[in-house]
Amino acid sequence: MASAGYSAVVDRLMSALGRLPGIGARSSERLAHHLLKCPPEEAIELADAIRSARDRIRHCQVCFHLTETDEPLCSICRDPRRDPSTVCVVEQSRDLIAMEKAATFQGVYHVLLGRLAPLSGIGPEQLTIDALAARVQSGTIRELIMATNPNLEGDGTALLVANRLGDSGVKITRLARGLATGSTLEFANRDMLADAFSGRHPL
Amino acid sequence: MPTSRTLAIVIRTIEVFETSLVATLFTRELGKVGVLAKGARRPKSSMQGGLDLLGLSDIVLIPKASEALDLLTEAAPVERFAPLRRDLASLYAGYYVAELLNELTDLHDPHPKLFDAARITLRHLGEPELRSRRVLRFELACLRELGLMPALESCAHCGAPVEPRGGTIWFGLATGGILCEACRTGPPHVVAITSGELEAIRALASPGDAWRRLDPTSTGLARARETVGAVISHVLGHRPRLRPLLGVSTE
């Protein structure tokens, strides 16, 4: 049913936009007005891009990063220069992209497609831990680097993976944390300093 | 603009917009509050680390009128409960504490004693031999603070003394405590508990140290856990989401 004087079509558009993350009622109304005001081809291009992405993008069969439907493996898993024995485990593809932009890691990845968040109804079964366990059992992996976010949910997710795969014989490590390069001690908070002390290494 | 400063436990966070967070905080002086933390996820945010789930922070907020979210202006981490990051059973128990605080309390209804009980519980969840008893004590602390503590000394319905009959005592989940023989028929949701189970609940609800000496393998303690869990579920109207996961923390 149309609301606030809008036709059912506009109402449907606003309702669809309002379901996007971070978009509330006012933002969805503003975006709908923009789409109705901009050149038609611009709006159609957006619609086509959404449809095309939904139709053509799948998860990589090995690491669960995004890939196109005609490629069962993503570009990283297909790259022969990457070291398949070192796997960096991340929560989502956006984290993988951040790692790739840094260009410091030559191994491969595993995307969990989320993090352990029982308060939000996300348990181990919603993550790709079974697939990760199968990769570990294949015997090609020497080290899992847990690169989940450095917060309680990220730490919990890392703990869950470590518990599950702790007996597999694979080395499981966690990304270092503490002081950021270029920062100053004066402005570091207590947690940063505690992490930096506990994670210190010989020179 | 008037501000309020208090200690807070972060019990829920939701990412909004590019860099902001909406958080539910259980504060010592203001009770449960919903806040908007603008820019809290920016790399150089002054609130970084202060809004990590189940962390204790010193916060400053600007209260908003009506039902709008309060505006969080500062959140400095005070205490991180390290056991939650080392042990999955402790983590699930911590999440359960957060779930109870979020679901059992109302906005802007302060309960300083419950805040202190939550802080102590979170601090000591790393002790595996006492963990489930600490969780039980926290459940009872919630019920006591909210005025829902089951009657454990006399009949919840008529106030008469209750004598165990053949070692069995009737416990009304809806009536709110033990029931005498005369009152046990009629009220719905009445279960039978043993006198050992009642003693265990009494010890867990008491301020002394008797709860520490309870035999962790006794059936009385196990049944006490079930009964108190049933009361919590009855109060909430549903089973807490984290309750099945507490299985990993049984002693």
Image (cartoon, rainbow, N blue to C red):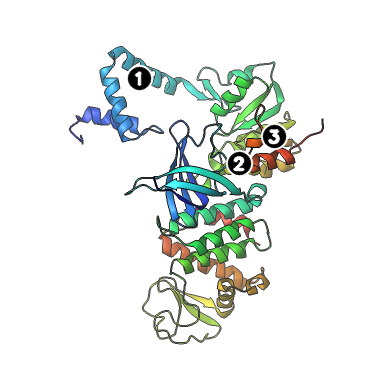
Residue B79 versus residue B168: which sits nearer the camera? B79
Label 2 neighbourhood size at 10 Å, few (<14), some (14-19), many (20+)? many
Coordinates of residue A74 in the picture (x, y in percent): 58, 20
Task: Tell whether label 2 touches label 1 (CB within 8 Å).
Answer: no
| Residue carrying label 2 | A157
Residue B156 versus residue B54: which sits nearer the camera? B54
What chain does badge 2 belong to? A
| Residue carrying label 3 | A176
- Most extreme residue toward the left is A5
Eye-nearest disc, 2 or 3: 3
- Do marks 2 and 3 share a subunit? yes
Label 1 neighbourhood size at 10 Å, few (<14), some (14-19), many (20+)? few
Secondary structure under tag 2 reads helix
First of labels 1, 2 by sequence position = 1
Image quarter for residue A30?
A: top left
Q: Is residue B9 above or below residue B141?
A: above
Q: Answer with left or right where residue B17 lies relative to residue A197.
A: left
What amino acid is at disc 1?
Answer: Ala
Mark 2 and mark 3: span between their CA atoms?
A: 16 Å
Q: Is residue B222 above or below residue B151?
A: above
Q: Which mark is residue A47?
A: 1
First of labels 3, 1 by sequence position = 1
What amino acid is at disc 3?
Answer: Ala
First of labels 2, 3 by sequence position = 2
Mark 1 and mark 2: span between their CA atoms?
A: 36 Å
